[in-house]
Image: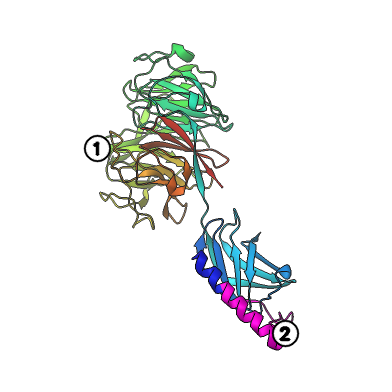
């Protein structure tokens, strides 16, 4: 495409130059409108070259300015009816506007901007073991389908099933043990005095407390920021969700038929949604609606706040694969964890198979746009492995947990790689 565009521009430039010898060349008419008829390609990310077709352009690039969604683009070349531009970083979706010495024309169609997301390693070096430290000096043994969450200060908390600990990672990548000593058991205490069986998920409440599920111990526990654990109640809880407006805790029981429960103030629970197919995780949006991952049927289900009436279903029940698009056309492959950002967009951790199977087609994080429920792949793809990189070039191996910080950073529990990954939007 790039080579073709350069050839096209070169040929057109030659034609204009030849014309200049006869009639002094093409000249922009400031009294006539600038018109953009079309552009190609219609979508792309930063760095994409786009060729604009129109009328009343100018061959003098000094007077030509082009913006995409209001963000200034690079003008690489201009001929009589064509302008070659480069899409700028963070442009966003919007119309393309050409300004020639203040005379402006705007495209009818919007350029569909495709932002890039780069996966990096926050902590862990890929080996299975236990060691606190910074970045790749730290060692994890995640072992199970574990989750993670992030507080308002950007600290990440990881449920580490095989090591029977809750780990804390600072924004700078420094890993410490918040609670647990590696022994297999149930014991309350502070820091390494506490003991767990298999901590599966964590959720941070509005006060910065870390709520932890341990289904093997039949407990949900609260851990204060200083690492002190206390019992909330006796439940066989797997995935956790918190309504930060009121502090209500919800949990999934990972059964078939399965249910979603609300934890009451007295430490008991109320079953609010039933008949689910192995519900693995639950998240709460800004209005109190619940979104449940049904791992057994590979769909994401909405339940309306208060009434818990069914809402949208995202994915095709019983149909697996890596298919993006509308909610009814998309396919997931035994997903596991879910997170919701401040705009109520959904993030789904793709591979929730019991053994983290490398043949699962969703070695990735999926993204569901709030309201439209359109599904796309946020980072990763269908190939299991390890590689930091942008978009589908990034490789994951059984991502099971996902969390979104208030600044939009996305964190992933990369189970088989024993790493915690960070995904940065451009």
Q: Residues within 10 Å of mark 1 (few under 14, many from 20)?
A: some
Asked whether, in this view, residue 339 is left or right of residue 183, the answer is: right
Residue 181 or 68: which is nearer the viewer?
A: 68
Residue range in magenta is 9-35
Residue 207 or 152: which is nearer the viewer?
A: 152
Q: Earlier in the sequence, mark 2 or mark 1?
A: 2
Residue at 37 percent across and 39 percent down: it is 385
Marks 2 and 1, how far apart in space? 79 Å
Q: Is residue 377 above or below residue 209?
A: below
Can you give x and y, in whole percent of width and height, for residue 294 in the image? 32, 42
User: What number is the disc on residue 24?
Assistant: 2
Residue 28 or 239: which is nearer the viewer?
A: 28
Q: Is residue 116 above or below residue 64?
A: above
User: What number is the disc on residue 20?
Assistant: none
Can you give x and y, in whole percent of width and height, for residue 264 in the image? 42, 29
Asked whether, in this view, residue 373 is left or right of residue 331, the answer is: right
Q: Which residue is mark 1?
A: 256
- Whether the magenta-drawn stretch holds residue 23 is answered as yes
Asked whether, in this view, residue 225 is left or right of residue 71, the answer is: left
Residue 360 or 165: which is nearer the viewer?
A: 360
Say whether residue 111 is visible: yes
Number of callouts: 2
- The quarter of the picture where residue 266 lies is top left
């Amino acid at each position: 495409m790039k080579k073709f565009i350069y050839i096209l521009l070169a040929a057109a430039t030659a034609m204009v130059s030849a014309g200049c010898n006869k009639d002094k060349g093409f000249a922009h008419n400031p009294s006539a409108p600038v018109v953009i008829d079309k552009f190609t390609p219609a979508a792309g990310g930063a760095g994409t070259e786009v060729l604009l077709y129109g009328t009343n352009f100018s061959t003098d690039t000094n007077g030509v300015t082009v913006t995409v969604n209001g963000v200034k683009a690079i003008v690489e070349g201009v001929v009589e009816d064509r302008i070659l531009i480069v899409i700028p970083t963070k442009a966003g979706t919007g119309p393309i506007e050409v300004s020639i010495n203040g005379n402006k024309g705007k495209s009818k169609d919007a350029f569909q901007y495709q932002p890039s997301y780069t996966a990096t390693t926050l902590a862990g070096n890929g080996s299975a073991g236990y060691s606190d430290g910074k970045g790749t000096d730290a060692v994890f043994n995640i072992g199970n389908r574990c989750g993670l969450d992030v507080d308002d200060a950007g600290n990440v908390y990881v449920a580490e099933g095989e090591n029977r600990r809750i780990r804390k990672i600072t924004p700078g990548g420094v890993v410490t043990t918040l609670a647990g000593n590696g022994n297999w058991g149930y014991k309350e205490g502070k820091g390494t005095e506490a003991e767990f069986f298999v901590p599966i998920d964590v959720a941070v409440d509005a006060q910065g407390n870390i709520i932890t599920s341990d289904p093997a111990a039949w407990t949900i526990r609260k851990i204060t920021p200083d690492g002190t654990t206390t019992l909330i109640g006796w439940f066989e809880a797997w995935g956790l969700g918190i309504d930060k407006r009121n502090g209500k805790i919800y949990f999934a029981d990972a059964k078939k038929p399965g249910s979603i429960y609300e934890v009451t103030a007295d430490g008991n629970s109320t079953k609010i949604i039933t008949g689910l197919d192995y519900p693995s995780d639950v998240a709460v949006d800004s209005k109190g609606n619940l979104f449940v991952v049904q791992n057994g049927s590979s769909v994401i289900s909405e339940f309306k706040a208060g009434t818990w009436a069914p809402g949208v279903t995202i994915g095709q029940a019983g149909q697996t694969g890596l298919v993006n698009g509308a909610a009814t056309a998309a396919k997931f492959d035994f997903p596991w964890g879910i997170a919701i950002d401040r705009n109520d967009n959904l993030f789904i951790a793709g591979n929730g198979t019991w053994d983290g199977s490398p043949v699962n087609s969703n070695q990735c994080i999926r993204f569901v746009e709030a309201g439209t429920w359109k599904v796309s792949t946020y980072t990763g793809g269908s190939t299991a492995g390890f590689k930091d990189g942008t978009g589908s070039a990034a490789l994951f191996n059984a991502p099971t947990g996902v969390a979104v910080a208030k600044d939009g950073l996305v964190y992933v529990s990369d189970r088989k790689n024993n790493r915690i990954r960070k995904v940065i939007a451009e």
